Image (spheres, rainbow, N blue to C red):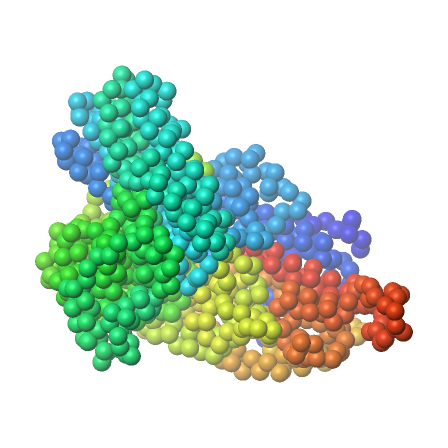
């Protein structure tokens, strides 16, 4: 039927009805697949012209819009947007004041940082910036603001075409500004309560229970495209943001005139420094770096290199203020400066442990590896000896420009930041892949070498299976060093970091929470053993917004409770160890929680309620069944370990999985190979964690969050059921897995696996009656046969099915994938199949740049469309040879005559349109699930 007659809404309803009918029919036909049945129906609609690429795109937009509207509602519920923000803040302040009883006690309660929100640039920018803003507006009840984007006829669910580090920084800064404003509103409630109870003292209060940090522009783990000048620029941008906020909020009063002049002068100096900063992403000349460096040095004092002068000016303005409203504004500004210095958010730096080890090769020469058991003691002893002899050296920008070792360069960058940009607060130094205490001693040696040991907070990251298992030993090795203990005592805190994306993909999210909690308690015991209970423990949970990255999906309150269970909190309370909780908010999904003032206020409110809540009893029954708990989580871990090493699992995520995803950040998801397209993924470790998780979402089976739970539950079904009913801790962990199950479907997964099985294509070839279709089907079947994926994928399906069926046998309430999500999968499968059928019409050609037709067909099966179509356009040009007919002064030589307009019209262009449809569906699926990766 003609396109004008297509009723997209009716088609969407029909598609979802077909899914429901096929699911019902599958009860009587266990050998069929309901998803493939609907896929075949869609393929026939495409064959007949009833479903064009344009109509399919409109269908995806309609289904995606519905998913977006539901996601907006879930987001509002997630953060508790229906609660009265002011009332929530006032209640928190009132309870703290009542419990304190005196101004001194109240100050101690609200001036100690309790929670840090860290804005990271993980590659989770899965939607366009304008769509993220519209989604936040819609969740906040502003449908009018969201309408122009959501109702746009060309609405796309794909991310921005090019995402740069600058884009990530700007989006983080937008969220941070809302977060700072929300924290101001919380702090205003504390000030109001203090003014009511202690009218003579309240202006001395500087509440900072919640602080903000960001590592955007400071994270060089696994990337080399961020220059030290880029990092300095971003820290200056953060400084400019702090000064802009202060000037924006200060009243035009005589009492504030000196303060406003000071901040205006500092802001102007920072802008002059920024004017000389090299553009982001460039390789500046030495002369440009010199000019930038001189601006930082010469404008240092005017630009306020720390918060000391600014706080003195704020105190003077407070003393001169004539009314309480002016005092309130000034007290809020001072609280923000006490918490964040002269930056809008504190910096977190991150690099890899191997980079630190390399930096000390000249100090501690050895051919061995520090993590090897036979080498550990020697390396630790050498590091301790080096720490006893280390002498500080001066750092200047010339030395920084000349430095080639990445770890030393980062440490020198930090030294220059605390000297010339903002030295108000210590800088966090996160170390990925920490597997030995030697790594922490290396970091301390470098910090001491560059004279900033008192300005840097060294923090190991535990995220791999081995690191979570060996974490206590790693901390113990560091604490044995008197130098490291002295360093901790001087700072008054130990910072540790837990990663959830990597731990979840290797041992399963449900198991990782158990190992993280166990590691926390062991660290508590170590601090007590070394008589370090007076230091504060900062626990940074680096997780994202999806269950695959460790975030509980039910509510923000559940998310915070899941990460910081009462039993662990009780253990620290008994030991007398104060803790600070930190959580990451990653990319578009994380920034959404701060996307509007109401969302930011609700998010800050739920965080404040969690960190100020009275300690809960730690007598959860799961801790009374240690044998069951250990066996349950160990079983999940073992099953997940076996799955990760299954060759079929690598085939599942690596064959065409990466091609389902657009680039969602400023760094690649996996290494590229010269000329042969994307590298074949032979083990999940070859993919970064977030793309790994995102592929599982896109293939309809979120294995990293649910696999192994069935086997574990089946070992003790009665205890499993009892723990779900009686244990909040266990039930919360199970509900995370259940959410993953609710967005997973074995029929969907089987449909993708069968699409890679040549047998299914041979079966279709035997039965087809459509003219020309048999040849297309045979071409696809033969190409798939050469990949030899089917045996491994069949074994993988057996493994996954066995676990899922055991869970359904043990838990009767396992949720099922929504019909609309299954419909999107069926539509994408139809688009994939049609691309492959079109590929059969690509003519044979001579090897081109070493590429044969067989190799090209394999790349098309892996959905490597953009690069493959570009090559085909070279091999089969659409336009005539421009040299034909021109006089070159000699008789014309041979030309490859002819054009390939028909091939482009009938094959290549439709393939490109279908691939665009596949990527749009990936974006819509992201909104169905509620997060990327």
Q: Is residue 296 left or right of residue 789?
A: left
Q: Is residue 438 left or right of residue 758?
A: left
Instruction: Determine the image quadrant of residue 244.
Output: top left
Instruction: Determine the image quadrant of residue 503.
Output: bottom left
Total marks drawn? 0
Q: Nearer the viewer, residue 7 or 560?
A: 560
Which residue in the rendered view is the most extreme toward the front? 287
Q: Nearer the viewer, residue 243 or 925?
A: 243
Q: Residue at x 72, y 49 (%)?
A: 7
Q: Position of residue 764 (x, y in %)?
A: 69, 76
Instruction: Determine the image quadrant of residue 802.
Output: bottom left
- Compared to residue 413, the image places residue 899 above or below, namely below
Q: Residue at x 52, y 77 (%)?
A: 793
Q: Residue at x 53, y 46 (%)?
A: 129
Q: Nearer the viewer, residue 263 or 109?
A: 263
- Compared to residue 208, the image places residue 695 above or below, namely below
- Compared to residue 181, the image places residue 560 above or below, namely below
Q: Residue at x 34, y 66 (%)?
A: 355
Q: Position of residue 434 (x, y in %)?
A: 29, 66
Q: Position of residue 87 (x, y in %)?
A: 32, 31
Quarter of the picture containing the N terminus is: bottom right
Q: Position of residue 850 (x, y in %)?
A: 66, 79
Q: Is residue 244 left or right of residue 616?
A: right
Residue 258 appears in view: yes
Residue 77 appears in view: no
């Amino acid at each position: 039927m003609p396109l004008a007659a297509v009723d997209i809404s009716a088609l969407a309803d029909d598609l979802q009805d077909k899914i429901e009918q096929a699911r019902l029919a599958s009860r009587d036909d266990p050998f069929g697949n309901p998803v493939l049945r609907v896929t075949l129906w869609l393929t026939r609609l495409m064959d007949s012209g009833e479903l064009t690429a344009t109509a399919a795109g409109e269908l995806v937009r309609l289904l995606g819009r519905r998913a977006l509207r539901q996601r907006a509602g879930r987001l509002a519920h997630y953060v508790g947007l229906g609660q009265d923000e002011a009332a929530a803040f006032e209640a928190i302040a009132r309870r703290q004041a009542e419990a304190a009883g005196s101004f001194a006690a109240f100050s101690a309660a609200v001036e100690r940082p309790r929670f840090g929100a860290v804005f990271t640039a993980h590659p989770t920018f899965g939607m366009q910036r304008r769509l993220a803003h519209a989604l936040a507006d819609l969740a906040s009840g502003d449908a009018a603001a969201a309408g122009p984007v959501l109702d746009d006829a060309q609405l796309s669910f794909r991310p921005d075409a090019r995402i740069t580090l600058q884009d990530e920084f700007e989006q983080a800064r937008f969220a941070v500004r809302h977060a700072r404003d929300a924290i101001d509103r919380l702090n205003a409630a504390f000030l109001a309560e203090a003014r009511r109870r202690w009218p003579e003292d309240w202006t001395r209060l500087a509440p900072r229970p919640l602080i903000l940090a960001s590592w955007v522009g400071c994270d060089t783990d696994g990337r080399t495209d961020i220059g030290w000048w880029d990092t300095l620029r971003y820290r200056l941008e953060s400084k400019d943001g702090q000064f802009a906020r202060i000037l924006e909020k200060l009243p035009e009063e005589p009492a504030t005139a000196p303060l406003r002049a000071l901040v205006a002068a500092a802001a102007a100096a920072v802008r002059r420094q920024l004017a000389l900063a090299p553009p982001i992403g460039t390789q500046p000349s030495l002369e440009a770096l010199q000019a930038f460096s001189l601006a930082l040095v010469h404008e240092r004092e005017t630009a306020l290199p720390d918060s000391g002068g600014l706080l003195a000016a704020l105190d003077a303005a407070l003393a001169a203020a004539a009314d309480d409203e002016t005092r309130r504004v000034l007290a809020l500004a001072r609280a923000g400066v006490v918490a964040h210095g002269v930056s809008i958010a504190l910096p977190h730096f991150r690099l890899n442990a191997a980079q630190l080890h390399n930096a000390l090769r000249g100090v501690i020469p050895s051919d061995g590896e520090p993590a090897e058991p036979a080498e550990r003691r020697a390396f630790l002893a050498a590091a301790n000896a080096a720490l006893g002899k280390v002498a500080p050296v001066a750092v200047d920008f010339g030395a920084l420009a000349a430095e080639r070792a990445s770890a030393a360069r980062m440490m020198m960058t930090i030294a220059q930041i605390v000297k010339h940009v903002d030295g108000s607060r210590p800088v966090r130094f996160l170390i990925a892949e920490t597997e030995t205490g030697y790594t922490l001693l290396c970091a301390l040696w470098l910090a001491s070498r560059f004279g900033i040991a008192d300005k840097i907070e060294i923090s190991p990251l535990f995220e791999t299976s081995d690191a979570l298992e060996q974490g206590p030993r790693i901390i113990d090795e560091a604490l044995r060093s008197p130098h490291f203990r002295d360093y901790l005592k001087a700072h008054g805190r130990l910072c540790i970091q837990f990663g959830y994306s990597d731990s979840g993909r290797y041992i399963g999210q449900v198991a990782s929470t158990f190992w993280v909690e166990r590691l926390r308690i062991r660290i508590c015991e170590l601090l007590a053993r070394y008589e370090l209970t007076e230091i504060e423990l900062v626990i940074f949970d680096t997780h994202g917004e999806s269950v695959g990255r460790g975030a509980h999906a039910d509510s923000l309150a559940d998310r915070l409770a899941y990460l910081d269970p009462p039993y662990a909190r009780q253990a620290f309370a008994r030991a007398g160890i104060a803790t600070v909780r930190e959580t990451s908010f990653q990319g578009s999904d994380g920034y959404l929680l701060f996307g509007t003032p109401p969302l930011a206020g609700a998010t800050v409110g739920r965080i404040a309620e969690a960190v100020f809540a009275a300690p809960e009893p730690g007598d959860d029954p799961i801790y009374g069944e240690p044998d069951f708990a250990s066996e349950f989580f160990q079983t999940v871990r073992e099953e997940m370990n076996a799955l990760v090493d299954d060759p079929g699992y690598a085939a599942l995520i690596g064959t065409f999985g990466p091609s389902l995803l657009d680039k969602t950040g400023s760094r690649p998801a996996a290494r590229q190979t010269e000329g042969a397209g994307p590298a074949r993924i032979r083990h999940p470790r070859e993919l970064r964690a977030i793309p790994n998780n995102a592929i599982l979402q896109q293939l309809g089976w979120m294995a990293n969050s649910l696999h192994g739970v069935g086997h574990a539950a089946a070992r003790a079904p009665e205890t499993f059921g009892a723990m779900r009913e009686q244990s909040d801790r266990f039930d919360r962990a199970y509900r995370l897995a259940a959410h993953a199950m609710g967005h997973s479907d074995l029929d969907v997964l089987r449909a993708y696996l069968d699409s890679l099985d040549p047998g299914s294509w041979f079966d279709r070839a035997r039965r087809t009656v459509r003219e020309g279709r048999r040849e297309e089907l045979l071409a696809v079947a033969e190409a798939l046969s050469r990949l030899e994926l089917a045996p491994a994928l069949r074994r993988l399906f057996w493994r996954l099915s066995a676990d899922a069926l055991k869970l359904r046998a043990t838990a009767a309430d396992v949720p099922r994938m929504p019909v609309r999500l299954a419909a999107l999968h069926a539509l994408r499968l139809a688009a994939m199949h049609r691309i492959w059928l079109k590929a059969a019409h690509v003519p044979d050609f001579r090897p081109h740049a070493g590429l044969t037709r067989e190799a090209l067909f394999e790349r098309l099966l892996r959905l490597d469309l953009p690069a493959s179509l570009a090559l085909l356009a070279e091999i089969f040009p659409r336009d005539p040879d421009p040299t034909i007919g021109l006089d070159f002064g000699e008789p014309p030589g041979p030309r490859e005559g002819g054009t390939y307009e028909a091939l482009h019209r009938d094959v290549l262009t439709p393939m490109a349109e279908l691939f665009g449809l596949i990527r749009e569906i990936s974006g819509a699926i992201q909104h169905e699930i509620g997060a990327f990766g």
